[in-house]
Image (cartoon, rainbow, N blue to C red):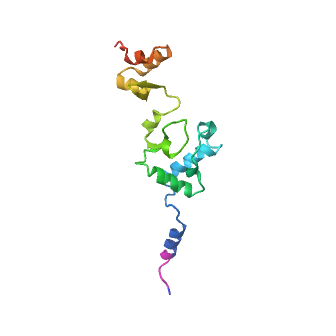
Amino acid sequence: HTKSCGCLHRDVARLTKTIHGKSNTHVWNTYQNMIARCTDSKNPQYKNYGGRGINICTRWRNIPPTGFQTFLADMGEPPGQQYSIDRIDNNGNYKPSNCRWATGSTQARNKTNNVVLEFGGKKMCAAELSRSLGIPYKRLLRRIKHGWPQDRALTAPTGG
């Protein structure tokens, strides 16, 4: 009456117990870390997220596994291991319309402590503008700090 060597029982158990099949993956860990930053006051990053009012939309916070499955359906898999979840408006909540997969360098340009300037109809961080315009970053910041009008700060010659 034996139907297998024992692996059938294991395989059937795996199929019946598997909910989303993403445990211990990059996307699952990203999701878990997002939840912890916003909801667990003991998390070291809580003060920068939940502690300053950053929340997660109800769709993504639903009781697991539904919340994760909805998150995955909305966001898809990250394009690679170097990508993590990024809020486009870093003062806004985690929700489909405010989130994207981004690299560390993209996220570094989207931090609350960045100086954001507008040039040519686009908002950019001062570091990015200084590189693209060939103005030393510290010089640009000094100009802004000393009250230079933004257009002049961004277009005045650097003097060598």
Locate residue 153, reporting x and y percent: 42, 16
Q: Which residues are magenta?
A: 2-8
Q: Total label count?
A: 0
Q: Quadrant of residue 126?
A: top left
| Residue 51 screen position, x and y as percent | 63, 38
Q: Residue 24: horizontal and vertical position, in percent? A: 51, 55
Q: Can you say whether 10 is above or below 117 in the image?
A: below
Q: Residue furthest left?
A: 160
- Residue 4 belongs to the span the image colors magenta: yes
Query: Which residue is the extreme one toward the right?
Result: 41
- Is 86 on the left or on the right of 55, as rendered? left
Quarter occupied by residue 55 = top right
Q: Magenta stretch: dominant SS?
A: loop
**What residue lies at 47% left-to-right and 79% top-to-bottom?**
5
Q: Quadrant of the C terminus?
A: top left
15 vs 133, left or right, is right
Q: Residue 157 in magenta?
A: no
